[in-house]
């Protein structure tokens, strides 16, 4: 994995208009893998994770864990196994220099606090998609007895004088719904707390279920993961475990949209179709068919074929917490709706400012009209290639999809955003027949 300082200057050059066809295997989920890796801080025994994707965010998390005394062996990627062991617990400071590159660094807070009795974590960074405060994380940890202070941009958390957190009722509801990373933090902390913790308004995302599976394999006592109420009975200590990372539902949804926007046909293996029911519902309304090819397979690791009608239909879609339509697929679906026959309405309920891709799509001939947290997309017959600027991870993916369908050449600048969540996307698209290449150099 190249250093971010170098990758940030890369761009994609896309010659659009080619139909995608072939097979693709969905990689392990970034959003699942990062909290799973942080969970290794809860024990001094080895934790082995299979299928951790080789991404910039993963490399940043490994750098952070290395500073926090976690040894690593093994390999990333499909077929690889990464083993993490917390060998030195003397340092509990997650520094700004690393945390600023990746919001999920906050996942280290709960595990370190529960295991080491103290943690100092810099306020997190990440994509420019709007405010994502960590107040719910801190509220949840305070409910377990933690003392929380802020100093120089760092969160300082300490366990009670007894040295151990205490189970209690924790409410994690916020103005935009539940918090996924906040749920992960409180869930990890509660596994080693004294007594029972009840997390109300917990995030229901599949990534939380995956984290609970690992924690249970490590010896935690957890009930209700995947529902709004999670019950955790704390234990004295956790052991090591082996775990296979959940396939990436956002990557799967992105390639579904890629097949549709190019009027192609893609067969996807290792597809978490049961985690994509809301997305599948909206795509099928547009005219995208997602067909299970083997009903005997686990629905979290299914093989599906994706095709689409030649004329796409407009839809209304609103992003919501799981099991609703995921905010991380909003930009990709919007790119697809730019070519639908009629007016679509896209409403963003999770991050109301997550529309930086709208102006860039307009450069390609799209007709998108924003009013607050809603965008009306009036479909056009064709998009035209243009130079565009990636602003965040999922917006980058949406612009790449638009470039695949556009007439002429599209240049997507600053694809370091894309490298945070997609493992060499250009190589996957090349194998499916796209004319896309990575160019290193200045924007």
Image (spheres, rainbow, N blue to C red):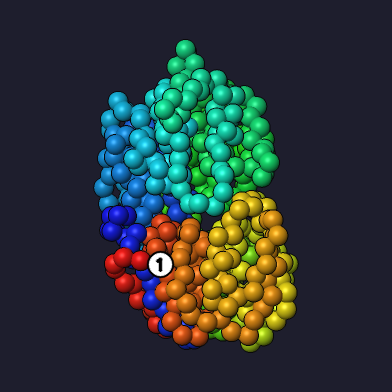
Helix, strand or loop status at disc 1: strand
Q: Quadrant of residue 412?
A: bottom left
408 lies above or below 102: below
How many other residues sit within 10 Å of disc 1, few (<14), some (14-19) or many (≥20)?
A: many
Q: Looking at the image, how many numbered discs can be counted on the residues?
A: 1
Q: Quadrant of residue 306?
A: bottom right
Left or right: 376, with 300 as reference point: right
Taking the spot 47% from the left edge, 70% from the top edge, the residue there is 388
274 lies above or below 91: below
Q: Is residue 341 visible?
A: yes
Q: Position of residue 349 (x, y in %)?
A: 68, 52
Looking at the rendered image, the quarter that the C terminus falls into is: bottom left
159 lies above or below 104: above
Taking the spot 39% from the left edge, 63% from the top edge, the residue there is 414
Q: Which residue is farthest top?
A: 161
Task: Report the front residue among 380 and 103.
Answer: 380
Taking the spot 64% from the left edge, 52% from the top edge, the residue there is 352
Q: Which residue is mark 1?
A: 413
Q: Quadrant of residue 174?
A: top right
Task: Report the front residue among 441 and 136.
Answer: 441
Q: Position of residue 258 (x, y in %)?
A: 52, 75
Q: Is residue 320 visible?
A: no
Task: Report the front residue among 233 and 248.
Answer: 248
Taking the spot 42% from the left edge, 59% from the top edge, the residue there is 417
Q: Position of residue 269 (x, y in %)?
A: 48, 70
Left or right: 21, with 204 as reference point: left
Looking at the rendered image, the quarter that the N terminus falls into is: bottom left
Q: Position of residue 158 (x, y in %)?
A: 45, 21
Task: Report the front residue among 148 and 109.
Answer: 148
């Amino acid at each position: 994995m190249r250093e971010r300082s170098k990758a940030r200057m890369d761009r994609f050059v896309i010659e659009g208009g080619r139909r995608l066809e072939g097979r693709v295997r969905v990689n392990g989920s970034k959003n699942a893998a990062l909290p799973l890796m942080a969970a290794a801080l809860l024990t001094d025994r080895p934790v082995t994770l299979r299928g951790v994707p080789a991404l910039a965010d993963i490399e940043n998390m490994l750098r952070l864990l290395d500073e926090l005394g976690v040894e690593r062996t093994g390999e990333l990627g499909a077929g690889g196994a990464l083993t993490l062991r917390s060998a030195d617990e003397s340092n509990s400071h997650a520094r700004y220099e690393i945390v600023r590159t990746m919001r999920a660094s906050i996942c280290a807070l709960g595990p370190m606090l529960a295991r080491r009795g103290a943690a100092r974590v810099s306020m997190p960074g990440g994509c420019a998609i709007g405010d994502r405060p960590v107040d719910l994380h801190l509220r949840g940890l305070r409910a377990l007895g933690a003392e929380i202070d802020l100093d120089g941009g760092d969160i300082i958390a300490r366990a009670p004088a007894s040295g151990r957190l205490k189970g209690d009722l924790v409410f994690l509801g916020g103005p935009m719904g539940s918090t996924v990373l906040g749920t992960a933090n409180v869930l990890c902390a509660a596994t080693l707390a004294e007594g029972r913790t009840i997390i109300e308004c917990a995030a229901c995302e599949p990534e939380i279920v995956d984290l609970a599976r690992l924690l249970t394999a490590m010896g935690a006592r957890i009930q209700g993961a995947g529902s709004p109420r999670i019950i955790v009975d704390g234990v004295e200590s956790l052991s090591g475990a082996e775990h296979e990372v959940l396939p990436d539902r956002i990557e799967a949804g992105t390639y579904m949209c890629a097949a549709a926007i190019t009027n192609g046909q893609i067969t996807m293996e290792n597809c978490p179709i049961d985690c994509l029911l809301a997305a599948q519902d909206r795509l099928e309304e547009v005219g995208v068919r997602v067909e299970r090819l083997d009903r005997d397979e686990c629905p979290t690791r299914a093989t599906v074929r994706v095709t689409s009608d030649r004329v796409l239909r407009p839809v209304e879609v609103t992003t919501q917490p799981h099991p609703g339509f995921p905010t991380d697929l909003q930009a990709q679906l919007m790119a697809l709706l730019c070519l639908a026959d009629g007016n679509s309405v896209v409403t963003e309920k999770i991050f109301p400012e997550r529309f930086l891709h709208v102006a860039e799509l307009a450069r390609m001939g799209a007709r998108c009209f924003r009013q607050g947290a809603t965008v009306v997309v009036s479909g056009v017959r064709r998009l035209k290639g243009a130079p565009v600027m990636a602003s965040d991870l999922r917006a980058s993916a949406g612009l790449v999809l638009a470039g695949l369908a556009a007439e002429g050449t599209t240049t997507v600048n600053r694809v370091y955003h894309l490298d945070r969540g997609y493992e060499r996307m250009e190589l996957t698209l090349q194998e499916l027949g796209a004319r896309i290449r990575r160019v290193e150099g200045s924007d």
